[in-house]
Structure formats: structure tokens, C-alpha cells
Image (cartoon, helix red, strand yellow):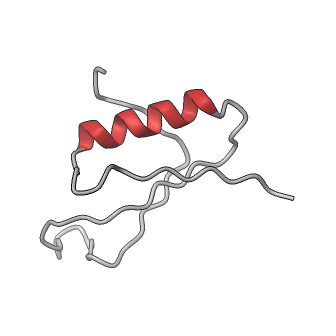
Amino acid sequence: GHNIAIAILPDREYSTTLAAVVVRDLIYSFLNVCIRLIVGIRGGIPSLKYGIYLSDMIAISSLKSTYKL
């Protein structure tokens, strides 16, 4: 079997700082998590220059925080 932990942001509260706090708390609460998948919505404009579209999902192999919490 697989164990899955899901976290969501509070209703109508969206910010990169809040998302970083939620992810940090999730990582500290579940130390043995091997794979972390962050899925979200982005309210920005698609970028043809970088090939990023609103329906894209971005997968990362490591998570490095640049925010000071």
C-alpha cells in the first residue's frame, strides 16, 4: 500500500509565502515522504516564450525553498 498526505491552502488565501509554509509543515509532519508533488493553479498569463500554458503541470525532483520563513 501507499500512504498519501494531501494539504490545501485555506479558502481564498493564495500566496507563495502561504504555500511555502504549508509545504514546510507537511514535510516536517511526514518525515518519510519520498515523493512530493505540488499541484496548484496559477492565475497568470501563459508564456509562449517559455512554453508554459495554464493547463501545464510542472514536476520537480527536489524542493529548495528560497523563502525565509
Taking 62 as reference, is 25 above or below it? above
Q: Quadrant of the N terminus?
A: bottom right
Measured from the top left, where is residue 45 in percent x and y?
12, 71
Measured from the top left, where is residue 32 in percent x and y?
73, 34
In the rendered view, does 46 fall on the left or right side of 54? left
Which residue is nearer to you in this view: 54 or 17?
17
Which residue is nearer to you in this view: 66 or 13?
13
Q: How many marks?
A: 0
In the rendered image, the residue lying farthest to the right is 1
In the rendered image, the residue lying farthest to the left is 45
Q: Quadrant of the C terminus?
A: top left
In the rendered image, the residue lying farthest to the top is 68
In the rendered image, the residue lying farthest to the front is 11
Residue at x 42% of width, y 53% of height = 8
Q: Quadrant of residue 64?
A: top left
Measured from the top left, where is residue 34 in percent x and y?
70, 43
Residue at x 58% of width, y 48% of height = 36
Taking 18 as reference, is 48 above or below it? below
In the rendered view, does 47 fall on the left or right side of 28? left
In the rendered view, does 48 fall on the left or right side of 69? left
Residue at x 55% of width, y 48% of height = 61
Measured from the top left, where is residue 7 in percent x and y?
49, 50
Q: Quadrant of residue 50?
A: bottom left
